[in-house]
Amino acid sequence: MSSDVPVLVVGGGLVGLSAALFLSDLGIPVVLVEQHSGTSTLPRGRGLSLRSTEVFRAAGVEEALRAAPASILRDLPAIMHADTLVGEERFRTVRPAPDTYTDISPTTPVVVDQNAVEPVLREQARRRGAQLRFSTRLDSFEQDDDGVTAVLRDRATGSTSTVRADYLVAADGHRSAIRGALGVGTSGSGTITRYANIPFEADLSGPLRGRRLALCYLERPVSNTMLTRLDDPRRWVLMVPCDDDGGLPAGQFPRLIREAVGQDVEVRVLDSQLAEHGRAPTWDLASWIADRFRVGRVFLAGDSAHVTPPAGGLGGNAGIQDAHNLAWKLAAVVRGHAAPALLDTYERERRAVATLTADFSAQRQARRIAGRGDGASGLDPVAVGLGYRYNSAAIVPTPVAGKRNDVKPGVGTDRDRNEAGAATPSRDFTGRPGSRAPHLWLRRAGRPVSTLDLYRGNFVLVAGAKADRWTEAGRRAEVQVPVVVYQLGHDLEDERGDWAAAHEVGHAGAVLVRPDGFVCWRAPDDVAAGPAVLAKVFDQILGRRTEPESGRPCDDAGRAQRM
């Protein structure tokens, strides 16, 4: 049965729009459906992490995101804990300054609210050819060996239509109907605390005493209360732990707000932001991970796959990176460059990162609520956000020292790998296979360029200044996938001479970087350089096997693929 579109994305929030953007940027036709008529009108996520900004930079949308209206939190860097807003602080922590990241990235995090990010992603995906169908609901879907058949309903007219896709990406949120239909369970703590949000307007300049606070952890009116800004200096939301039914009487809202502030201030509850019958909207502070991220031709991404506590702001950002990881793999399979086995590495890699992120966020949330702050936890948010290393079949480990540079899956010197799919995070950005490629400033055509800006949409082989044999091999190897080859001293200038050491290879060595900017193979020298070695590397990374006699790539059933 033929397909109407290679990929159907369900969910038009932060993660779904990111998936549509990344796929369309790679030239893959995609249809996105979203049951709501537009993008989010609420701030929700309040910033893009360093890694998220890097991937959007690679997709060519960083400038548009920085031009979007900035979050009110941009100039409010502090978080504190006290009994009340006017009470004595138990801790205060401040967001790192932008120059903190100068040595590790060409960019910085962007403090921008989700309701400002989503329209940018929507427009950028549309410009790249994505079909975006809002006010459209997924009624049902079925999958078979060849694809997914989805029944869609236009919410304005009630009419239905059928779309046939090769693959389906479920970005339909933490209550994912797709995850439920697949029967995928979840593991983890589940709901930790249910909160009721009380939106209000008040002049709190007096209680603030000039402090530039973005978020306050408070003990009043009850322990675990949180207070943060909305979208204006006078507009706030008080998040109060509540019963499962969220039953906070509306008449008590002003009293609860004044208790949290610690002063008798004038308060106006924002009725337009309340739920039906004047009830405070509720949400669950939760931590869980789906037991599976892939079922056949359906992939879970973002909140449909994992939910983390908000401390650290990594939940939505992890979803963006899910989409980035999955997009290039779907593109490679759809184009016939990779075997379907490559898609198995999505769950292997991203579920491990989701576990790491959830553990970090839960620990940070617990410390903040307890008034202990972030400083003594031993946890590094930058390492957690981009210092992990993948361990999957799409990564070829560094060869054992003193042995030939043959490609043997599972053989390597990286002793801190684990079976979960990711290594312990670190700021030691050394270009080891499985890690996000390190950032260095080089020069190309006389202009400065970050190494990270070299990695967009294709595999990239970077060879050292004395690695002529790898350069030649990269340009001659028959790997059935586009590869861009650069050599130091020819295509790129390394004025400081840092490239080889930063990647832990010699000047005759080479590094192969995946389309998502992660190192997938490296050679410390040119002892085994040759097109055949690179062909084997690509066969492993792309999930292809070879027939002993013909050497032709084979699919999972052992049939030779037509490339």
Image: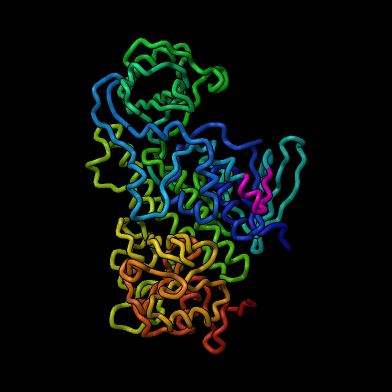
Query: Which residue lies most toward the front here?
Result: 446
* Quadrant occupied by the C terminus: bottom right
Q: Name the residue: 38% across, 48% down.
A: 357
Between 253 and 116, the one nearer to me in the picture: 116
Q: Name the residue: 59% across, 63% down.
A: 331
Between 561 and 489, the one nearer to me in the picture: 489
Q: Name the residue: 46% across, 15% down.
A: 249
Between 266 and 144, the one nearer to me in the picture: 266
- Residue 377 vs residue 394: left or right? left
Horizontal and vertical percent position of residue 148: 66, 56
Stretch in magenta: 123-133
Q: Residue 128 lies in magenta, yes or no?
A: yes
Where residue 449 sits, quadrant-wise, is bottom left
Instruction: Mark yes or no: residue 503 visible.
Output: yes
Instruction: Mark yes or no: residue 390 visible.
Output: no
Compared to 533, does 35 lie above or below?
Answer: above
Compared to 514, does 148 lie above or below?
Answer: above
Compared to 167, does 209 lie above or below?
Answer: above
* Quadrant occupied by the N terminus: bottom right
